[in-house]
Amino acid sequence: MMRAAVVRRFDEDIAMEDLPVPEPGVGPVLVRIEASGLCHTDIHAARGDWPVVPGLPFIPGHEGVGIVEQLGDGVSRLAVGDRVALPWLGHACGHCQHCIDGRETLCLEQQNTGYSIDGALAEYAVADARYAVRVPDGVRPVDAARSRARA
């Protein structure tokens, strides 16, 4: 089990809950979260402020940093023990023209961390290994999360 901040309704406060630790499946990695920024995007998501609202329930947080604990099937670019940052662009299809042209942020099938994919305001999160970014040695987790929050 893990603790996570969960949005169940847009008109209620975020609640801390005990949830099962997610499984990485094919392509993602399981990340033990060490630190996470809190972005105003998270507040908007939790309130359902934007025209495209997240599906309920969800775990906010797209500025997480943590240690890869488990590799999903087919993952070879990351290793258990790597420190990674979770990206806002959590997943894109990889085969549409936008993705082929290197403009994944325009992919109509994109999934966003802490919005349409559960995010980092939890003890564990699953991240697509293609989009998780290694954090350089010597950068503390809180500094990596903080710098993402300022970007």
Image: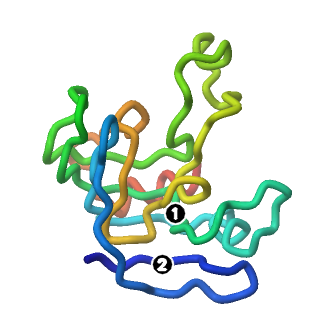
Callout 2: few (<14), some (14-19), or many (20+) C-alpha neighbours within 10 Å?
many
Residue 94's disc is none
Considering every residue shown, the one lying at the far right of the view is 51
Task: Label 1: state its secondary structure.
Answer: loop
| Separation of marks 2 and 1 at Cα, in angstroms | 9 Å
Is mark 2 in CB contact (under 8 Å) with mark 1?
Answer: yes
20 relative to 80, above or below: below
Q: Which is nearer the N-term, disc 2 or disc 1?
A: 2
Q: Which residue is mark 2?
A: 5
- Residue 97 in the image, given as x and y percentages of width and height: 67, 13
Residue depicted at x 36% and y 63%: 142
**44 horizontally vs 118: left or right:** right
Residue plotted at (49% across, 45% down): 87
**Residue type indicated by callout 2:** Ala
Residue 111 spot, x, y in % from top left: 58, 43
- The three-letter amino acid code for the residue at tag 1 is Gly
Does residue 49 appear to the left or right of 113 in the view shown? right
Q: Residues within 10 Å of mark 1 (few under 14, many from 20)?
A: many
- In percent of width and height, residue 81 lies at 14, 47
Disc 2 is placed on an element classified as: strand
Depth check: give the residue in front, 19 or 106.
Answer: 19
Between residues 1 and 89, which one lies in front from this camera angle? 1
At x 55% / y 67%, what residue is drawn?
58
Q: Quadrant of residue 73?
A: top left
- State the residue position of label 1: 61
